[in-house]
Image (cartoon, grey):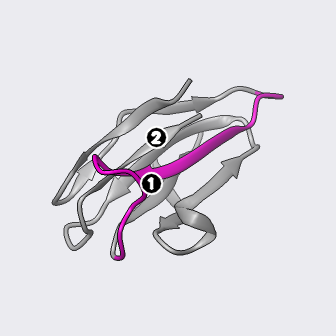
Amino acid sequence: MATQILAVGTGAATSSDFTVVAGTPALVFLNDAAGPTTKGCQADILAKDPAGQYYRVGELRSGVRNGSTVIVVAGVYQFKRPADSAACGVASA
């Protein structure tokens, strides 16, 4: 069952923490209200370090691997949509 991590919208936004548990990879992907995302959708993947700081470790881009990736490393992540992104959100399955 899919879970919405970052609400579909426009403009800059950052998700709440998203936790990946050891041994349970997570498929994360761009989504929008109309189905497959359109050109210009993007979100950065941020990983939380032990001190509580977030660092960019990857990205989701429409048209690149279908705007999806699998996170296999246990940890805490956030997803950040930049201000110039087309309308989209981030979901997991």
**Numbered disc 1: secondary structure:** strand
- Magenta highlight range: 22-39
Q: Quadrant of the N terminus?
A: top right
Main secondary-structure element of the magenta-colored stretch: loop
**Quarter of the image where one finds residue 49:** top right
The answer to whether residue 52 is visible is no
Q: Quadrant of the C terminus?
A: top right
How many other residues sit within 10 Å of disc 2, few (<14), some (14-19) or many (≥20)?
Answer: many
What is the tally of numbered marks visible in this picture? Answer: 2
Q: Amino acid at mark 2?
A: Ala
Amino acid at pointer 1: Leu
Residue drawn at (38%, 51%) of the image: 35
Left or right position of 73 against 4 = right
The numbered disc on residue 93 is: none
Q: Is residue 8 left or right of residue 92?
A: left
Looking at the image, the residue that sits furthest to the left is: 11
The quarter of the displayed image where residue 73 is located: top right
Q: Tell me, yes or no, whether the highlighted magenta stretch contains residue 83.
A: no
**52 sits to left or right of 13:** right
The residue under label 2 is 91
Residue 30's mark? Answer: 1
Q: Residue at x 35, y 55 (%)?
A: 80
Query: For this rendering, which residue is in front, 71 or 17?
Result: 71
| Residue 37 x/y as whole percent | 39, 61
Say which of 30 and 72 sits in front.
30
